[in-house]
Image (cartoon, rainbow, N blue to C red):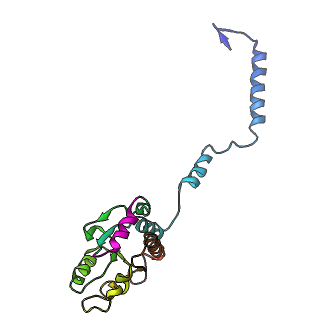
Amino acid sequence: MEVAGNYIYPDKDLDRAEGQVIERLKIDSRQPIADPDAWLESELKENILLTSVDKMISWAQRSSLWTAICFPACCAFEFIAANGPRFDLSRFGMEILRASPRQADLMITAGTLTWKMAPNVKRIYDQMAEPKWVIAMGACAISGGIFASGYNVVPGYNRIIPVDVYVPGCPPRPEGLIYGIQMLQQKIAKKSLFEKGKA
């Protein structure tokens, strides 16, 4: 150590002190020091999720179903109840009902469908963007219900558009509709984006 050009210790003492520091450092340095970036590996494990494109897209599709309105009859009231605060369809990503079929990917059909109204329902379905799904809610939507024998009644929406899930009842309770939506979400989860012939 140097103070105003003079050493406090004689040179021999300085050499001995430096030698002791070096020897202590040698003893402490027998094992390599752990990689300072080791935290990075645990950080990656905690914050990176590996999945397939299929699973990611199906998760997004089933978690944000946008519904087109197609309720010509009394089942609409049960749908309104399902959308209310008690049953809260917004938990399933279905908070917003779409007035335009071009913004929707799910059609929930409910009520008696007459042949006069059928072309309009088909037109709404055709205007929806792919991929699209249909839930038939209630006996009238599934088979024409109590009006099935009428000359002017379509005996089920599946005569004019493909139906993915059927929710029976006259009218079905909101819990039944929610169960049907969960079934549709399971169906979407199993569907592959890269099916043969579609790639």
Number of numbered discs: 0
Q: Which residues are magenta?
A: 72-85
Taking the magenta stretch, the answer to whether it contains residue 59 is no
Residues 58 and 82: in front is: 82
Q: Quadrant of the C terminus?
A: bottom left
x and y, in percent, of residue 92 in the image: 43, 64
Residue drawn where x is 25% and y is 68% of the image:
100
Q: Quadrant of the N terminus?
A: top right
Q: Is residue 173 left or right of residue 127?
A: right
x and y, in percent, of residue 178 in the image: 45, 70
Picture layout, residue 158 above or below residue 34: below
Taking the magenta stretch, the answer to whether it contains residue 84 is yes
Residue drawn where x is 22% and y is 82% of the image:
117
Residue drawn where x is 33% and y is 77% of the image:
109
Picture layout, residue 153 above or below residue 66: below
x and y, in percent, of residue 125 in the image: 28, 77
* Image quarter of residue 71: bottom left
Q: Is residue 2 left or right of residue 65?
A: right
User: In this view of the protein, can residue 106 be seen by the observer?
Assistant: no
The outermost residue toward the left is 116
The outermost residue toward the front is 146
